Image (cartoon, rainbow, N blue to C red):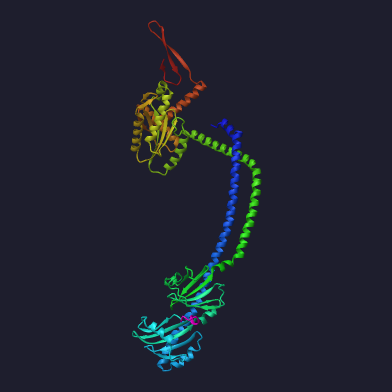
Amino acid sequence: MFNTRHFLRFSFPPLKTDLKNLILDEKNFVVGTILLALTVLLVIWLGTFTRIEGEKALTIESAVSDGNNIAAIVEANLNEVLDRATLYARRAQAAQAEERPAYFLHTEIRDDPAYLRAALFGSRGELLESSANRKQEPELERFILAAAAQPLSSARGEQLLIGHPSQSGSSSWRVPVLVRFSSQNEVRGYFVAIIDLGYLLRFYKDVKLGEGGRIEVLMRDGYQLAEINGTSLSGGIDYASTGYADFLSGSSVAGVIRHARPDASRSEVSVYRISQRYPFAIVISRDEGELIRQLTSRHTAYLLRAAIISIVLALLLLTMFVIALRQRRLYAGLAASEQEKKELIVQLEQEKGRALWQAAHDHLTMLPNRMRFYEMAQIELARARRSRNLYALLFLDLDKFKPINDTLGHAVGDLLLQQVGARLRSSLREYDLLARFGGDEFVMLIADVASEADIAKVAAKLVDAISQTYHDLEGKDVDVSPSIGIALYPRDGQNLDTLITHADIAMYMAKSAGAGTYRFFDASLNAFSAREVDLLAHFKNAIKRGEFRLHFQPRVSLDDYAVLGLKRWCAGSIPSTG
């Protein structure tokens, strides 16, 4: 039940407690506002720095992409130059067969600016012809001796080899190349030429790689053939023993160089591309610091904008903080009032639920009452119409319960009813319906039973369970037995009221047969019961209308004619002696 005194205490809390809660709420509000401001500022600055770092990473990625494109172009041009070496070797061999190599070397090589000079040698390394009309070519002959030590790559055909340039500073980018003619594992001759990588790389002197940018051509053994840095051309550095050339031993054709160049004084972004046709690689390097410095003005603007936004946000939050503090007390009062309403609604809902439960259940046994049983049984009978099995309604009444209640007291009677309800519940299936109709009457609806014999077994089980002695009921042991009447659906009735009526009639037949038994409804008993009900209704109406008359006839002794008694007669009834 609703507690008015508790409600009043909740509605008007003590002043001391209210002030304490208000101070704590304001403190929490201040802390929350500060944390919110710090969070927003953190998001602003974190976003700014994230954007700056993202643009730096994007710039580096763009430099890597540009470097890959430039490396691919340089590789293609150098492949084309080296392809011409193989072509010249074949044509020189053909000219040698026609005994006119001098004509070929003097005309073809002279018109190709990438080739400084060339020479044709025999199988034993003897000079056959030189484009420079030299009697000897010591530089080229040393290259032939070095190439002779290398195994042939095939039994027949040409093999192009690239050598290290001369160590002199003026010719470090002039690279010797050799094409070896072979047949049946025998060397037939050599074509040797000097390629001017400086001529090739000068085409890229206008490529915008920045102040520290450079293009390098490396051999697969780590030796630098040539390098162009702006207009400066150099070469001849050996990186074989440094980590800078580790990428040359890997399986990747292109990528980013992870190690710095040994002589590098600043961080660089270097990409490489390894030729799949010839033993060389192209490296494109740019100064990382110079790339980042291009973004300085833009990043400064980002930081300035973040600072301005932070200041504006701080002012706004301060203004909101001041306004919120002024309204805090009003909001606190409204919140307290709203909380009171919610508490009251919850309490009313609980009381409503409790009242509904109590209205649908027996307060003593906690079993469903008559109203709740009717609701649940109607649903079960609707389902029973689609079932082929039997449904049975059992009406149970305790034998001689009134004397127990009168002699042992209502407390013992209540305990007995509670234990009877508990035994009934434990003896039935979970989905069977059980209810207390009032007094010592219990009603059960047994669902989905295969046969009448099974229902009889259930009834016998209930009789046996209820008939067991009830120990220690207020210190007393009580024995009681039930009488059970059974009506079957749909044989004994098509609706719940009919089934209950017929089960009640069968229960009285069980009581007439003796205590602790059960009986099924017999249709022949229905007519007799209806006649009794009809007569009882007529008797009540006749009494109200005064239609009965009572007559007394004296009984006289024949010896002395003395009145011995009276005989009672009632109109419309069988006379009886009183």
| Residue 523 visible in the snapshot | no
Rendered position, 18 above or below 139: above
Q: Residue at the location (59% across, 35% down)?
A: 17
- What span is colored magenta in the figure? 166-173
Residue at 45% in and 26% down: 535
From what the image shows, is residue 431 above or below residue 400?
below
Residue 225 in the image: state x and y as whole percent.
47, 78
Query: Which is nearer the eye, 437 or 112?
Result: 112
Left or right? Give the position of 88 relative to 47.
left
**Residue at (45%, 14%) from the top-left corner?**
552
- Figure disc tally: 0
- Kindly report the secondary structure that dominates the magenta region of the rendered protein: loop
Where is residue 166 drawn, in percent x and y?
46, 82
Q: Position of residue 237 (x, y in %)?
A: 47, 76
Residue that extends furthest to the front in the rendered view of this protein: 168
Residue in front for this viewpoint, 533 or 84:
84
Q: Image height check: is 132 above or below 487? A: below
Is residue 102 on the magenta stretch? no
Instruction: Please state the horizontal and vertical placement of residue 348, each as a whole percent of the image.
Output: 55, 36
Considering every residue shown, the one lying at the far bottom of the view is 99
Q: Residue furthest top?
A: 560
| Residue 177 seen in the figure | yes
Quarter that holds the C terminus: top left
Q: Nearer the viewer, residue 501 or 97?
A: 97
Image-quadrant location for residue 411: top left
- Toward which corner of the image does residue 229 lie, by quadrant? bottom right
Left/right placement of residue 292 relative to residue 524 reads: right
